[in-house]
Amino acid sequence: MRYQDQAVVVLPYIKNEDFRSYYLSLPLKEMKYYFKSLFEALAHTHKKKVIHRDVKPSNFLYSVQNRHGVLVDFGLAERESEQEIPKPTENSIQKANSEKKSKVASYVYRNFNENGIPGVPRKDYRPSIRANRAGTRGFRAPEVLFKVQKQSTSIDVWSAGSTDDTEALLEIAVLFGKVQMERLAFDLNRTFFTNIPTVKDKGIKFEALIKTYSSDSWKSDPDYHTMMPSAIDLLKKCLALHPSKRISAAETLNHPFLCETIN
């Protein structure tokens, strides 16, 4: 609608509740409806070869009562390119520990502070890499943080599966461990190195993480023990480190957690 020099866009009202008001108490059965609605929206978007780039709860207007949501805010969206993402190789981890990694390690140690305290270099003279890093902190996929130029719709699936504020590579590394991060970096033509003590060779299992941080209300959910295994399996597939191994939005709709009969 236009009036003189003013342009007004009128959009339909989408009934929804604030995600913060229900996410801690939402039963697993209701989570099925939430994620099924979200992945249906993503599957439709990705079918059009569009990457949303900013999938997060505040951009998915969901009504718990109606069990229906609408994906909004395509301000950062872009077309998916046709270039293929590098596939992981069997000997990635051996090559990641090769001469290239040694050079990076040598550089890092030379440029850390004088006391050798774990952290970041005082000065970073490495050439910068230009890549799209648009998105919201806490929901960006590893390949976005690694500044990989070729990015696909799989970054939206990672965002949908994100449950922690894992904005930085360091925080993702704590979850997945150095070994997996080094393998991923090599496959994406990058190098990952850290001497932060909290980053271990092996990561943390999702099962242990969820068991530790699940609220008491979740643990008392009658469906907790029967549905949680398939829910964790879907989470693992959404948060697969390598984008080529990550489940697609369309595939999630056939996953047991979302397609099993809901009584």
Image: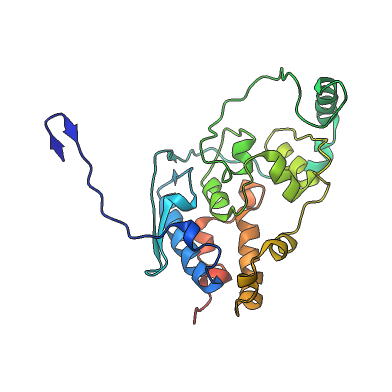
230 displayed left or right of 107:
left
Q: Position of residue 198 (x, y in %)?
A: 81, 44
Front residue of 122 and 47? 122
Q: Position of residue 195 (x, y in %)?
A: 83, 35
Residue drawn at 62 percent across, 51 percent down: 164
| Residue 90 shows in this picture | no
Quadrant of the image containing the N terminus: top left
185 displayed left or right of 108:
left
Q: Total of numbered circles in the picture?
A: 0
Vertical position of residue 196 compared to residue 126: above or below: below
> Farthest residue toward the left?
4
139 displayed left or right of 125:
left
Q: Position of residue 228 (x, y in %)?
A: 64, 71
Q: How is the image coloured?
A: rainbow
Q: Position of residue 259 (x, y in %)?
A: 51, 72
Residue drawn at 55 percent across, 46 percent down: 155
Identify the image quadrant of residue 70.
bottom left
Front residue of 19 and 144? 19
| Residue 260 shows in this picture | yes
Residue drawn at 51 percent across, 47 percent down: 153
Identify the image quadrant of residue 101.
top right
Front residue of 247 and 110? 110
Residue drawn at 76 percent across, 55 percent down: 204
Vertical position of residue 167 compared to residue 210: above or below: above
Vertical position of residue 230 compared to residue 158: above or below: below
> Farthest residue toward the bottom?
263
